[in-house]
Image (cartoon, helix red, strand yellow):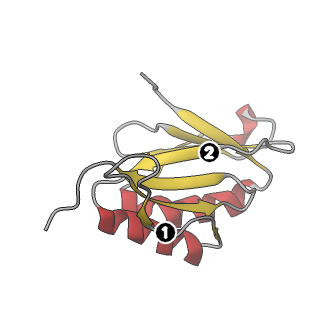
Amino acid sequence: MIDHTGVTVTKGSVSRAFYEKALAPLGYAVLVEIPTEYTDGRVVFGMGVAPKPDFWVTEGDTPRKNHIAFRAESRAAVDAFYQAALAAGGKDNGAPGPRPQYHQHYYGAFVLDPDGHNIEAVIHTPETA
């Protein structure tokens, strides 16, 4: 069972603005900010659905590219994530839609964040009427 995950980014303030907007449709918000006196001046924050952050963003040197998939509660939430992420400066990496190559009910959307991380919102249940 995964407790938390995260990404390293080159510009903490730029990434924070992106993630706050992109993940809002999924119910995510910044829940914890680590004071810079404990991080050598680097931006570090944890996001999640209250009460616990499960996605951490850390400002650092050149990051490796990661793929992170966030669970959505509906196809509409996947669509809203995609639109919010693009509006926040993300780049299209796969518009919302079915992905039957993964499994019958897979519905996801993919965007690249400001550092090129592949960020996804996905739902695995059948479409409801």
User: Crowding near pointer 1: few (<14 within 10 Å), some, many (20+)?
Assistant: many
Q: Amino acid at mark 2?
A: His
User: Crowding near pointer 2: few (<14 within 10 Å), some, many (20+)?
Assistant: some
* Residue 75 visible at all: yes
Decide if residue 81 is on the left or right side of residue 115. Answer: left
Q: Where is residue 45 shown, x and y percent of the image? A: 59, 44
Task: Give the residue at x 55% y 68%.
Answer: 85
Task: Give the residue at x 74% y 36%.
Answer: 37
- Residue 117's place in the image compared with 114, above or below, is above
Q: Where is residue 112 shown, x and y percent of the image? A: 66, 61
Nearer to us in this view, 111 or 61: 111
Nearer to us in this view, 74 or 39: 74
- Residue 106's place in the image compared with 87, above or below, is above
Q: How many marks?
A: 2
**Residue marked by disc 1:** 82
* Residue 28 visible at all: no
State the residue lying farthest toward the left.
Answer: 129
Task: Give the residue at x 74% y 45%.
Answer: 65
The answer to whether mark 1 and mark 2 are in CB contact below 8 A is no
**Residue marked by disc 2:** 67
For the residues marked 1 and 2, what is the alpha-carbon distance in whole angstroms?
15 Å
Q: What mark, if any, has residue 99 been given in the picture?
A: none
Dividing the picture into quadrants, the one containing residue 74 is bottom left
